[in-house]
């Protein structure tokens, strides 16, 4: 079945985007109309304190999810995705820099056998500092995680609905959705998309998001390599530490017995014992992590955000 004939859900997290959301909504409506697309538009307000919600309430058709406070872009995206009823989910930013005119191209690329299609802002229209920080984060991501995309930070992406049947988003994980899905065996594609300069409002990107992104990169790397076998990581490190500690103690014993060198006042025996204890601790940590991973897979977790209100204008 041609993906253009399927129901499309466009999910847009927003916070303090008064002046942008109305224009963006109309652009998406026009794209739907001009390309004969059937779908819904879902805005998730992440604790705005300007006129964003008021502006959205004047639009139709639209679904609006309003958070009780600011929980972050990833939480807003997760809530929108869970509320989506379409067979294909399009995610994009609410600042107007992503171009809705690229939506048909993303959908068409899915028909080439991909489960996810990511936008690539090859010609970014951002301040140099933001581009420099993004470049550094991208290099780190590519070093630790191979998700087969050039621009993981681009929110403009298309997904088949089944991609999110067992995925919960948290932290700053929206940047790593392709990596998470690749771990699960989904096929990732990419197309070059238009990127427009911000004309209204202020960017939400700052150093705090960069730090969170680094921590989440490490988390995704761990899940990619050891999500089902944490004991292999911690147990391996524990064995290596204990083995080195054992060799140090054997060396000390050999030195004392055969060369008669006293051990008093020497630090190496203490280092050997310390490394063996560290190794045991790492091994036990691996066992506990293994139990925690199994519990994670068997339990249902509460969402890390709270919804205040849902509005639907048809």
Image (cartoon, rainbow, N blue to C red):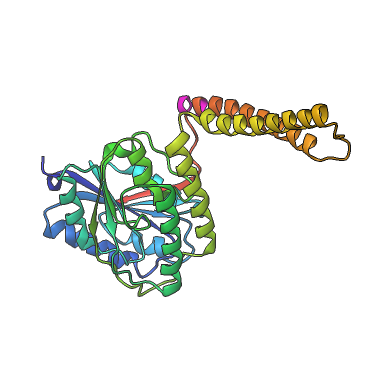
253 and 242: which one is in front? 253
Give how far across and how far down residue 174 sits, in percent: 40, 50
Between 50 and 17, the one nearer to me in the picture: 17
Tally the marks: 0
Which segment is the magenta one? Answer: 295-299
Q: Nearer the viewer, residue 29 or 308?
A: 29
Q: Which residue is drawn at the image coordinates 54% and 57% (left, top)?
A: 211
Quadrant assignment for the N terminus? top left
Q: Is residue 22 left or right of residue 37?
A: right
Q: Is residue 277 visible?
A: yes
Percent from the top left, x then y, of residue 200? 38, 73
In the shown orientation, is residue 281 left or right of residue 211? right
Left or right, 243 with respect to 95, comes to right
Residue beneath the point at 33% across and 41% down: 182
Q: Is residue 203 visible?
A: no
Between 202 and 234, the one lying in front of the other is 234
Left or right of 179, for residue 298: right
Q: Percent from the top left, x then y, of residue 176?
A: 40, 48
Q: Residue at x 53, y 50 (%)?
A: 215
Task: Tell whether position 79 is magenta.
Answer: no
Q: Is residue 295 above or below residue 116?
A: above
Vertical placement of residue 185 versus 58, above or below: above
Q: Looking at the magenta stretch, what is its main secondary structure?
A: helix
Reply above or below: 295 against 106.
above
């Amino acid at each position: 079945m041609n993906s253009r004939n399927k129901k499309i859900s466009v999910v847009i997290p927003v916070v303090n985007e008064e002046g942008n959301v109305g224009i963006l909504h109309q652009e998406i409506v026009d794209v739907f109309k001009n390309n004969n697309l059937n779908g819904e538009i879902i805005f998730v307000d992440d604790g705005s304190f300007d006129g964003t919600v008021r502006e959205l309430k004047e639009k139709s058709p639209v679904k609006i999810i309003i958070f009780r406070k600011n929980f972050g872009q990833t939480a807003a995206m997760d809530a929108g995705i869970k509320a989506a009823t379409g067979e294909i989910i399009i995610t994009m930013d609410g600042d107007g820099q992503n171009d809705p005119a690229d939506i048909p191209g993303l959908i068409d690329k899915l028909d080439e056998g991909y489960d996810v299609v990511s936008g690539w802002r090859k010609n970014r229209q951002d301040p140099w500092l933001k581009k420099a920080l993004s470049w550094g984060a991208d290099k780190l991501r590519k070093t630790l995680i191979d998700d087969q995309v050039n621009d993981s930070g681009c929110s403009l992406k298309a997904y088949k609905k089944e991609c999110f049947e067992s995925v919960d988003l948290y932290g700053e994980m929206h940047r790593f959705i392709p990596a998470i899905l690749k771990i699960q065996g989904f096929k990732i594609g990419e197309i070059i998309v238009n990127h427009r300069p911000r004309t209204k409002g202020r960017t939400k990107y700052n150093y705090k998001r960069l730090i969170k992104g680094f921590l989440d990169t490490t988390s995704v790397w761990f899940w990619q390599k050891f999500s089902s076998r944490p004991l292999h990581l911690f147990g391996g490190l524990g064995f290596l530490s204990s083995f080195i500690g054992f060799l140090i103690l054997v060396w000390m014993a050999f030195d004392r017995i055969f060369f008669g060198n006293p051990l008093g006042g020497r630090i190496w025996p203490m280092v050997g014992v310390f490394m063996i204890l560290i190794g045991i601790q790492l091994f036990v940590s691996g066992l506990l992590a293994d139990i925690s991973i199994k519990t994670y897979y068997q339990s249902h977790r509460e969402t890390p955000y709270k919804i205040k209100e849902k509005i639907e204008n048809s």
